[in-house]
Image: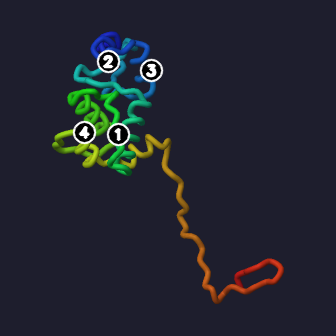
C-alpha cells in the first residue's frame, strides 16, 4: 500500500508515516524503482520510536514492581495489544510470547531482549571487563603521612 493508503488505514497523517519510515519503524518497507514507498498490506501498526520505548519501559517497570499501573494508551484493545506484541517480537525487542489471558499476565511472562533493552537505553551499558583490584590486608603498610599503601 502507498503512504496515503497506510495513513488512511492506520489513522495517521502522511507526514507521520514518512517520519516513522525515516526512523526505521516500518517492517517490510520497500522502495519501488519509481522512488515511491510500498508498505506491506498486512501492516497493522506502525508505532513511533517513543511509543515503542515507552511500552518496553513499562514492561521493565512492571518486572521491577508488580503493582506498577500499565498504560493502555497505545493499545486500548486486545487486537492492538496483540499487534504491538507481534511488532516488538518481529523487531527482536522481546522474546516469543505464548498464550495469555490479560495484560498483567502478559507482562509477567514477557521477556525483553538485550536488543530491546539497548533500544530503550540508547545503547549497551558500559561495564569494566576487569574485576576491581583487591589487596590482602597483610600487604598494606601504614604510612603516617599518606595513609595506607600497598607494600
Choose mark 4 or mark 3, whichever is in front. Answer: 4
CA gap between label 4 and label 1 equals: 11 Å
CA gap between label 4 and label 3 equals: 29 Å
Q: Which residue is mark 2?
A: 38
Choose mark 2 or mark 1, whichever is in front. Answer: 1
Quarter occupied by residue 61:
top left
Q: Residue 109, position in %: x, y?
A: 25, 48
Q: In the drawing, what numbered circle is on residue 101?
A: none
CA gap between label 3 and label 2 equals: 15 Å
Q: Nearer the viewer, residue 49 or 108?
A: 108
Quarter occupied by residue 139:
bottom right
Few, some or many C-alpha atoms within 10 Å of disc 3 (few <14, some 14-19, many ≥20)? few
Instruction: Pick whichever of labels 4 and 3 is earlier in the sequence.
Output: 3
Q: In the drawing, what numbered circle is on residue 69?
A: 1
Choose mark 4 or mark 1, whichever is in front. Answer: 1
Choose mark 1 or mark 3, whichever is in front. Answer: 1
CA gap between label 2 and label 4 equals: 33 Å
Q: In the drawing, what numbered circle is on residue 19?
A: 3
Do the CB atoms of the residues marked 2 and 1 lie less than 8 Å apart?
Answer: no
Q: Which residue is mark 4?
A: 103
Instruction: Pick whichever of labels 1 and 3 is earlier in the sequence.
Output: 3
Find numbered disc 3 in the image and state the secondary structure of the residue it sits on.
helix
Q: Residue 120, position in %: x, y?
A: 44, 41
CA gap between label 2 and label 1 equals: 38 Å
Instruction: Pick whichever of labels 4 and 1 is earlier in the sequence.
Output: 1
Q: What residue is rendered at 32% in x and 13% in y?
A: 2
Instruction: Pick whichever of labels 2 and 4 is earlier in the sequence.
Output: 2
Amino acid at each position: 500500500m502507498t503512504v496515503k493508503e497506510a495513513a488512511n488505514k492506520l489513522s495517521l497523517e502522511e507526514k507521520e508515516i514518512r517520519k516513522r519510515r525515516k526512523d526505521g519503524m516500518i517492517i517490510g518497507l520497500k522502495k519501488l524503482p519509481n522512488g515511491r514507498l510500498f508498505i506491506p498490506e498486512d501492516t497493522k501498526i506502525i508505532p513511533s520510536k517513543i511509543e515503542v520505548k515507552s511500552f518496553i519501559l513499562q514492561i521493565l517497570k512492571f518486572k521491577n514492581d508488580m503493582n506498577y499501573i500499565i498504560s493502555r494508551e497505545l493499545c486500548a484493545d486486545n487486537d492492538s495489544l496483540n499487534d504491538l506484541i507481534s511488532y516488538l517480537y518481529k523487531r527482536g525487542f522481546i522474546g516469543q510470547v505464548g498464550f495469555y489471558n490479560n495484560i498483567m499476565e502478559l507482562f509477567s511472562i514477557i521477556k525483553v531482549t538485550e536488543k530491546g533493552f539497548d533500544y530503550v537505553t540508547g545503547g549497551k551499558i558500559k561495564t569494566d571487563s576487569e574485576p576491581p583490584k583487591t589487596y590482602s590486608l597483610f600487604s598494606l603498610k601504614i604510612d603516617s603521612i599518606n595513609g595506607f599503601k600497598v607494600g
